[in-house]
Amino acid sequence: MTPACDDATNTCVGCLTNADCTIPSTPVCDTKTRTCRACQADAECAPSVCDLASDPQQGQCVQCNTDANCGANQKC
């Protein structure tokens, strides 16, 4: 699928920014390949975090992985 338009090259691409990646399992735009992919690090999901555990949400941006990701008096 190529829902974004790259004006610099006049081509349709998978994404230009993370905002173009609307499927939870592929929330990050790989700027080199212009395709959406799973997250690989927390920095790619700011202000959320990346789920790196081997679970159904692996590679998705989530609100928390541990209680340390939460505010005071909150639990993950």
Image (spheres, rainbow, N blue to C red):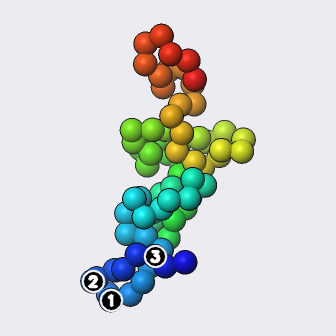
User: Which residue, as the protein is rendered here, is positioned at the far right?
Assistant: 55
Q: Can the viewer see residue 38 in this picture?
A: no
- The image's mark for residue 3 is 3
Tell me the residue that label 2 is attached to: 8
User: Which residue, as the protein is rendered here, is positioned at the far left?
Assistant: 8
Mark 1 Cα-neighbour bin, 10 Å: few <14, some 14–19, many ≥20: few
> Residue drawn 39% across and 42% down?
46
Tell me the residue that label 1 is attached to: 10
Would you place residue 62 above or below residue 30 in this image? above
- C-beta proximity under 8 Å, tags 1 and 3: no
- C-beta proximity under 8 Å, tags 3 and 2: no
Tell me where residue 71 appears, x and y as whole percent: 43, 19
> Residue drawn 53% across and 31% down?
64
User: Which residue, as the protein is rendered here, is positioned at the far top?
Assistant: 73
Number of numbered callouts drawn: 3
Closer to us: mark 3 or mark 2? 3
- The image's mark for residue 20 is none
